[in-house]
Image (tube, grey):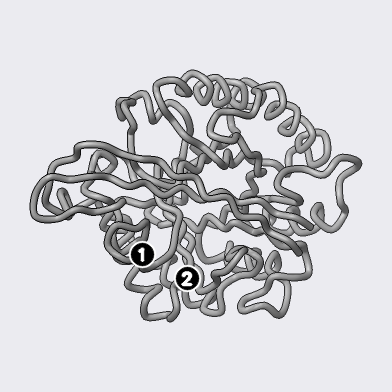
Amino acid sequence: MRYLNRYFSSSLTTIGAISILFVAPCQAGSVGVLVPSYFYPGSGGPGGPGDGWSAMTSAASQTSVTAILNPDSGPISGPADPNYVAAMTNLENAGGKVVAYVYTNNGGTPLASVESEISTYINQYGNLINGFFLDGMNVLPSTLSYYQSLDSYIKGLQPSYAVFANPGQPFLNGVSPSDYLTTADVLDIFEGPDTAPAGSAGFNNYPYDLNWFESQPHNRFANIIYDVPTSAAMLADIARANQLNAGYLYITDQGGDNPYAQLPSYWNQEVSALATTTPEPGTLSLIFGGSLVSTLLVVNTRRRLS
C-alpha cells in the first residue's frame, strides 16, 4: 500500500545573538498516545515483528491511545476491510480511539473532495470512526475559513467527532491564537526528527522562540517525533514535550521514508512512561534569544511505498 506523509519545516530569521530555523481530550491527568498507525493489521509491531494494532490494544488498558487509520493515504473505495474492522473493534473495546486520515494539501484540496473521503470512511466503518486527522494543514489568513469550514462540517456530522490536524509546526503565520484554535480540537504543532542542526526543523530546536501555545489547555496539542535513537532519548523527549504543553505524543526510533510503518522498538517502555506522566503547564517561555522578523514555510513531500 502507498502512504503519503507531508512534513512541514519552518525557517525564521531572527535579530539578536541566535538565529533559529526554524476534542476529544485525552484521559484526565494523562498524556495520550497519538499513533500514526500506517501499517496493516497483523504487521507493524514494536521494532517490526508482530501486530501493531494488537500492541496498541494492549496499551489502551494503560493510557489513552488514539490510532490514525490510514489505509492508503486516505480511504480505499469499496466495502470495509474486515481486518481493519476487527483491529479497530478490539482497540475500542479496550478503551482506545480511531481517527481517520485525510490529506488537505495546505488547504488546496477542494472541500468537496475532503468531505467525500470523510463520507467513505463513515460508510465503511460507521461508529468505529471517532474522528478525523487532517494532514497537510497550513493555516494562513487565506486558508483559515477553509479549515474552520471543515471543522464545522465534521462536527455537523457528529458532534462527538474529534478533529486532529497536522500543521507540523507552531507558527501562527498571521492568524491569532484564538482563531487558530477554531480549526481543530487537537493541533500537532511539531512533527519531525529528534535532532537537527541549528537552522533546521528538529525537536532539539523546537519551539523556535514561540510560546503562544503554553497558556492553552495541554490537550489541544500534540507532538510527533521520529528518529529518536534510544529509550533514554525517548524519555528525555517525553519530559521536554510535557514541559512544552503537549497533551498527545508519539515518539519512535524509526526514520527513513516511512517512520510510521511500525511501532518503535521501545514501544512498551514509551507506553509505561506516558501512563505515569502527569501533564504540567508549560514552564519555558522564550527558549532562544532574538526577535522574529519573518517565517518561510517549506513543504517536503514523502511517499510511503509498501
Residue at image point 57% right, 69% down:
256
Q: Residue at x 59, y 32 (%)?
A: 160
Q: Tell me if 140 is positioned left or right of 98 in this view.
A: left
Where is residue 223 drawn, in percent x and y? 42, 54
Residue type beneath disc 1: Thr
Helix, strand or loop at label 2? It is: loop
Task: Name the N-terminal-most of marks 2 and 1.
Answer: 2
Q: In which quarter of the image is the N terminus?
A: bottom right
Specify few, some or many for label 2: CA neighbours under 10 Å numbering under 14, 14-19, or 20 or more. Answer: some
| Mark number displayed over residue 68 | none
Rendered location of residue 248, percent (x, y): 44, 53
Q: In this view, does 179 lie above or below 298?
A: above
Q: How far apart are marks 2 and 1 (CA)?
A: 22 Å
For mark 1, what is the residue?
A: 277
Residue at 25%, 39% (x, y): give it. Answer: 212
Q: Nearer the viewer, mark 2 or mark 1?
A: 2
Q: Quadrant of the C terminus?
A: bottom right
Side of 283 where 175 appears, left or right: right
